[in-house]
Each structure stands twice: as C-alpha cells, then as structure tokens.
Image (tube, helix red, strand yellow):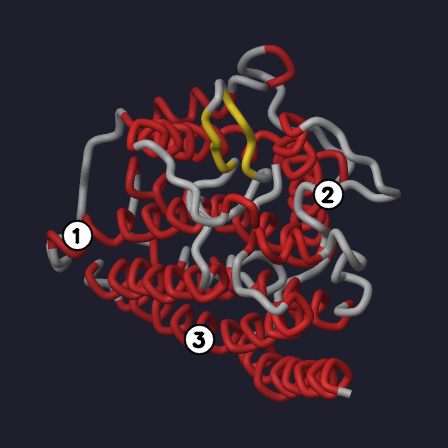
Amino acid sequence: MNVFANAFYYEPVWIQIVKSLVIFAVAFAILPVLTVYERKLLGRFQARYGPNRVGPFGLMQPIAEIVKFATKEPFRPTTSVGYLYRIAPIIAILTAIGALALVPFGDVQDIFGTPVGLYGIDVSIGPLYVFALAGISFYGIMLGGWASGSKYSFLGAMRGAAQLISYEVSQGLALIGVVILAQTLSLTGIVHAQESSTWYVIPQFVGFLIFMTASFAETNRTPFDLVEADAELVGGYFTEYGGTPFVAYLFAEYMNMFVVSGIAVTVFFGGWLLPFGIDPPGWVDPFVVLAKMMVFITFFIWIRATLPRLRYDQLMSFGWKILLPLATLNVLVTAIVVVS
C-alpha cells in the first residue's frame, strides 16, 4: 500500500498504544542482544573468547548482568544534586526511544482491515525531529556530569557537550543533500523517492561518509569515545553512576547506535527497499530494515576493534577544520547539480 495514498490516514488510538508498547519492547530487548553480540564479535576480531560461561554459548550473560546491576544498593555521592542526578539517565533513555519511533521499518500495511504504518510516527520534518531529540539528549550527559558533584564527571560532560555540538552540525549538513534530492523531509517519503531513482548512497556517497563519521562521534563510539575516556576521565560523565542508572546510560548509547543505523539505512540505503526490483510481501519489510541495520552495527563494532582513540584536540580539529567544510561543500555541489 503506497504511503502517499494514505498520507493522511487515521490510526485508531488503540493502534497507537500498541505501537508504543512494541517500540518500548523492542528497545528494551535491544540492549542485551547487542551487548552479547558486540562482546562475541570483539572476541572473534581479537582472537579470544567472548562470554561463554553463563547459559549456552554465554548467551545468558547479559541477563545475569542485568540482575546484578538491578540488585545493587542505590548510591550517590554526598556532593551530588539528588533529583538532577536521577533524572539525567532518564532523559538519555527517553530521547533515544523517541528517536527510534521515527525510524520506518516498512510502509503502510493493511492489518486485519486497518491501515497501519510500520513505524512509530511519520512527521513531515523527520530529520529535524531527530536532531531536536539529539539536542535534548545532550542534557542527559551534561546534567549527569554536573549533578554528580565530581570534577572528572564534569570534565567529561563538558567534553561531551563540545563534541556533540561540533559533530551535530556536520551530521545535519550531510543529510541536507539527501533532502535536496528527495524534495521531502518525511523519512518514509525519502524511502519512496529512492524507488524511482537509485539508493542515495550512490549520488550522496560523500554525504554518507560524513554522516557515518559524525555518527561515531555522536554515539561516543571508538575512535571518538572521548566523552568516557577511561585513561583521563575514569569513565567520564557517568563515573559516579552505578547499578541501574549506569545501565540506563549504557542502554542509551546502544540505542543511539541502533537509531543512527536506522537513519543511515533509511536515507542512504533505501529503507525497506530491496535491489534489482525485488518486491517481497509487506510483512518482510521490517526484516529487511533490521538486516541492513545489523550490517551497520557490525561496522560500528568492527571499527571499535580496529582503531585507537584519538586525542581530544585531534577530535575537535577534525570536526571543525575538515568535516564541516567538506559537508558544506557537498551541500553546495548537490544544490548546484539539482538546480542546473
């Protein structure tokens, strides 16, 4: 069913509630799966074993760790600001799940006679919505570091603020080229625009490289994990967090990696579309998107196992002196080509 033919279709409230519950269920199932996948894959990359003690092939290791963290005694430093110290991880989680609701896992499908979009919401300003949530998630890091009452945590938060602000600019500019080509800000609309042409990774290959590089910095992944550099900051902004709040920050980081992979798949790799004109049934669409996203997540892990961490001055210089001018040039060239 074409999404443009149902651009203003109405979903009953109960469907919206069910979709919200599904999004939360998927989100909270992602963390244990991704953690064991990353540790197993890192073990293979580094010629060692991953988790292999708890459960068959170590698959129950994340469950054991969740129980361990959940049963830890709650503790916070006496110098911390209580309510801000507690609310910071919640902000990080809610913004990550809110961004996941924008990732389209399929088109509008007819389910038991009711049109249902295989996504949380399809807003007309999709990328802007994602960056708005990313801007709010910044406060989860900043408040967590400041409210901990620790100089190391505060230093990690300040570094995180500078890093996120710097690379968000380049990340946003990398998507403008796609928006110019698709002539829409709707994420499902961008996918449909690739039906009649080609996947945008080909005409926007430079924008794709910029987006992925900036995404590594935005998600605090190696080689840009300066926010939590244990060599200098003893863990960064969440040094003073333990137990469930620590897991919340870990959850938000993995969720952001999942969301970034979903956005990259949507805007550059055709979302639920398959190459060579293959058109499977609608129920296959979410599995296509998930398979593409797992390729990106594997790439994130591969880079972590391969590259060392940059110095902080290298991180900032690369963002402002190389990535930002390159992203601006990509937008200008794209606009000139489209107009001419």
SS at mark 2 in the image: loop
User: Pointer 3: residues within 10 angstroms few (<14), some, or many (20+)?
Assistant: some
What residue is drawn where x is 71% and y is 65%? 208
The residue tagged with tag 3: helix, strand or loop? Answer: helix
Tell me the residue at 34%/54% (across/down). Answer: 238
The residue that appears at 75% across and 29% down in the rendered structure is 280
Q: Which mark is residue 77?
A: 1
Q: Earlier in the sequence, mark 3 or mark 1?
A: 1
The image quadrant where one finds the C terminus is: bottom right
- Nearer the observer: mark 3 or 1; the answer is 3
Q: Up-down: is 111 above or below 139? A: above
Q: Which mark is residue 273?
A: 2
Q: Residue furthest right?
A: 276
Query: Quick check: marks 3 and 1 in contact, CB under 8 Å?
Result: no
- Classify mark 1: helix, strand or loop: loop
- What's the CA distance linking mark 3 and mark 1? 28 Å
Three-letter code for the amino acid on which mark 3 is drawn = Ile
Left or right of 181 in this view: 219: left
Q: Amino acid at mark 2?
A: Leu
Mark 2 or mark 1, whichever is nearer to me: 2
Amino acid type, mark 1: Pro
| Pointer 1 local density, CA inside 10 Å: few below 14, some 14–19, many at least 20 | some
Res 250 seen here: no
Left or right side of 328 for 164:
left
User: Gap between marks 2 and 1, in whole Å?
Assistant: 50 Å
Mark 2 neighbour density, 10 Å: few (under 14) some (14–19) many (20 or more): many
Horizontal placement of 212 versus 228: left or right? right
Q: Which residue is mark 3?
A: 165
